[in-house]
Amino acid sequence: MFMLAVRSLRRRVAAFTATFLAAFLGAVLVMAFGSLSDTGAAEGVAETDRQTLSTMSTVVGGWSLVLVAFAVTSTLTLSVRQRATEMALLKCVGATPAQLRRMVLGEALLLALAGALVAIPAGALTGRALLALLKSTDQVADGVPFAYGPVALGAGIGVTVLGAAGAAFLTARRVARMRAVAALGSAADAGTGGGRLGKGRIILSALFLAGGVQLGVMAATAGPEGFDSMQFAGSADILFGIGLAGLAPMLVRGASAALARPVRRFGGASGYLAVLNLRQRTAQLAAALTPVILFVGIGVGTLWMQAIQNDTSAGAVPTTQEDAIETLNFVVTGMIVLFTCIMLINTLVAATTYRRREFGQQRLAGATRRQVLGMVVLEGAVLTVAGLVCGTIAALPTVLPFSYAKTDDWLPDPEYGIWLGTVAVAVTVTMAALVGTARRTLRTPAVEAVSVAS
């Protein structure tokens, strides 16, 4: 089964690209922040510098680690779901559930390990850049040497490999436990259906939501002095966003029900196809909704929080110190938001490319290329609206408590520019990824698209 996993990777390079990129970029992010901990633990580093480096590595790097693990899990889950037919056929020719799990686990481990190993040089370069930023903003003394050691490598490789292995095991278990005929029948509609939420997923999502709320409460009660409220609030939107993303299948169903009538009314044949797909491909479309929620939630929450900090700290702290902290926050936030943005593109491209066979079948049934492309646009519009609403909600556990901590008022001044700017980027990236990939996929002749296995 391990050799089968190797052959599968060699023959399905495009299908595994999304998971490899998630592993690579995630490992770079985790290794970069982990290197700050290695740097602080080196001999000769002053205690104040050690505390600064440790705090940055633990707080920001810790939540980055959670985000990366979630991203790797999401992309790998999407990849395995899309291969349900292949696994069902293997069961029909005699593969046991244990063998299927070993095959998927072997693929995941190879991808994760390859991504993490390739990420080592990039992680070192990014870690050096972070340390240089801390020095330039006077957070760390100029003489502190850069170190890249066990924490960076252990965290980067460990979280990537363990996250991929856990996702592969849980995702493969569903098909592997089915009987051969039932598995083949289920796989015929791979990626379709209601995308029912299991009890474990609901409980885990509830824990993330509760964690986000708890961090918001801690931010609100931290008081206006110091930066404790910012540390707590800055992590609240990440946890709350992951909690909402875990409920993505339910959110897709809700958005589909709310927007079905206007989509059908104004979309014509494309609208009918879009509503049908939104209802029948909930699990697959939920994977595309997840990065939209995270991108909007983290982007709006952290940028708005910094705007509140700027308004309330005028004259309270030295200008140079405030500028340094603002620069640092923007860079760190930018790294995390950039990661979620890349994951957004990555997931949308992977999900849309897989639909080549579906698009071919629709065209053979009479749909034109324009109608199929219109269907993709309308689906993207529904997912974008749902992602914007849920992402904005995810930002509230950061914005509202931080506003209360700094101003004693739960409602901060509106920052329309921040929200509109984030929305513009989310809409542009989402629609560009969907439409661009769909156009490229539709270039394949319909008969060829249907005859070639996805």
Image (tube, helix red, strand yellow):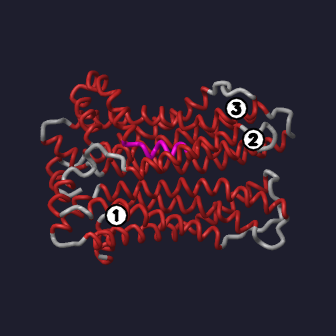
The reply to whether callout 2 and callout 3 are in contact (CB within 8 Å) is no
Question: Which residue, given by chain and number where applicable, does mark 3 sit on?
Answer: 403
Q: Amino acid at mark 3?
A: Ser
Picture residue at 65% right of the left edge, 50% below the top: 332
User: On the picture, is 394 further left or further right than 331?
Assistant: left
Compare residues 420 and 103 and report the one nearer the observer: 103
Q: Nearer the viewer, mark 1 or mark 2?
A: 2
Q: Which residues, given as a range, are shown in magenta?
A: 240-249
Query: Which comes sooner in the sequence, label 1 or label 3?
Result: 1
Specify the principal SS of the magenta part.
Answer: helix
Secondary-structure class at tag 3 = helix
Q: Residue at x 50, y 62 (%)?
A: 24
Q: Which mark is residue 222?
A: 2
Give amino acid for label 2. Ala
Q: Amino acid at mark 1?
A: Val
- Sequence-first tag of 2 and 3: 2
Callout count: 3
- The residue tagged 1 is 13
Compared to residue 48, the image places residue 8 above or below, namely below
User: Alpha-carbon neighbours of circle 2 within 10 Å: few (<14), some, or many (≥20)?
Assistant: many
Magenta stretch contains residue 448: no
Front-most of 147 and 231? 231
